Image (cartoon, coloured by chain):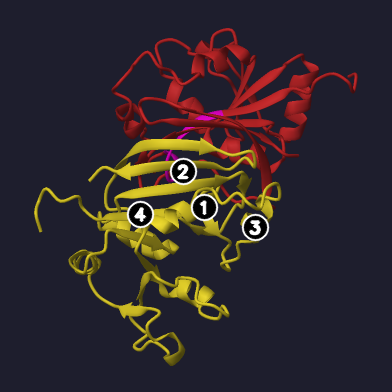
Chain colours: A red, B yellow
Amino acid sequence: MNQSDKEMKVSVFIATSLDGFIARKNGNIDWLMAADSSDKSEDYGYQEFYDSIDCLVMGRNSLEKIIDFPEWPYEDKRVVVLSNTLKEVPAQHVDKFEIYSGSLKELVKRLETDGCKSLYIDGGKTIQSFINKGLVTDISITKIPVLLGEGLPLFGKTRRDIKLTHIETKTYPSGFVKSTYEMVQ
Amino acid sequence: MNQSDKEMKVSVFIATSLDGFIARKNGNIDWLMAADSSDKSEDYGYQEFYDSIDCLVMGRNSLEKIIDFPEWPYEDKRVVVLSNTLKEVPAQHVDKFEIYSGSLKELVKRLETDGCKSLYIDGGKTIQSFINKGLVTDISITKIPVLLGEGLPLFGKTRRDIKLTHIETKTYPSGFVKSTYEMVQ
């Protein structure tokens, strides 16, 4: 690959409570659904972001949440599910996603070689792993104005301080505040 | 008190890392000091906030950090230190602060009766206790663009979901993002 080529984007796009949780302990996001009753047409930039990516990487837990949907929600995106236990894509989902187990750095390299320009990293543990490996390039966090007190945290332990560069912050009538950062590598 | 009187403000004004810590585990805030090298004259609204309050309530840990300063930093403010173990104000600090142990609700009532209009609640555990008792009216959080991975969290467990109303968000050239919320009681 030509060194002057722009590197692949590896993005996180997620909502958290003001105290930093992406879901309750049982995975429930009722608080998120309930938080914005004002304008159901506002998607906080999700569709624009989604249209900009060509590949999703998610963990097994994220897969569980969507696998029983009547329609596969990620048509026309390459989807990689990280799992050490899942060995085979179920028959009805062949061509929908692939399973990966191994080095995340290798995965990113492979996807880049395959021509992916923009990855969407989803799921708490998956996001934490990518951040810890220094593989995330940018992160958008939409802060919901509620304290849950406990739940599944967006961030986890890091091996060192990780600096970010603030790119922009947008506020919404619902009280949601979306901040975008680039990781300082 | 006349019910139409405006209630006393009980405010939190604090900085956290992007992952929600107010200090490292040992209390160190080197990361905060190091984060803004661009403009030492920018105080992120602290002086304006400080000028607006007439009383500080802090925990024993916060007191420890300032008690050895050559000059007492809170001249002309009433200072209440929450402590169950400290029984007497040391001689050199008589008239600087008072010690309180007991119900926070009672403390707030007493300060209100004494004519306080605006309290500044400081220190992680103290803030968490005031939030949990439903005594905080507003909170300003300045988000520093760094992940620490671990440390002393601003927020702790709550007895229930606590909703807030977003008032305003301000961004700074340093990348700091300050959001102000009112608590929905």
Circle 2 sits on which residue? A20
**Marks 4 and 2: same chain?**
no
Compared with B23, A27 (above or below) is above
Q: Is B71 contained in the magenta span? A: no
Same chain shared by disc 2 and disc 3: no
Residue A97 locus on image (x, y percent):
59, 17
Callout 4: few (<14), some (14-19), or many (20+) C-alpha neighbours within 10 Å? many
The percent coordinates of residue B41 (x first, y second) are: 63, 51
Name the amino acid, label 1: Ala
The x, y position of residue B161, in whole percent, is 29, 44
Q: Which chain contains the residue that carries disc 1?
A: B
Left or right of residue B53: residue B39: right
Using the image, name the chain to which the residue with label 2 belongs: A
Please state which of residues B73 and A99 is positioned toward the viewer in this rendering: B73
Q: Residues within 10 Å of mark 3 (few under 14, many from 20)?
A: few
SS label for mark 4 = strand
Q: Which of the 4 image quadrants contains residue B117?
A: bottom left
Q: Cα distance, mark 2 to mark 3?
A: 23 Å
Q: Name the residue type under label 2.
A: Gly
Query: Subunit of mark 4?
Result: B
Which is more foreground, mark 4 or mark 2? 4
Q: Which mark is residue B33?
A: 3
Point out the stretch of residues depicted in magenta.
A13-22
Is B86 above or below relative to B7?
below
Which residue in the structure is indicated by mark 4? B11
Indicate the amino acid at tag 3: Met
Q: Main secondary structure of the magenta part?
A: strand
Identify which residue, A110 or B172, lies in the foreground. Answer: B172
Q: Which residue is mark 1?
A: B15
- Determine the CA span between mark 4 and mark 3: 23 Å
SS at mark 2? loop
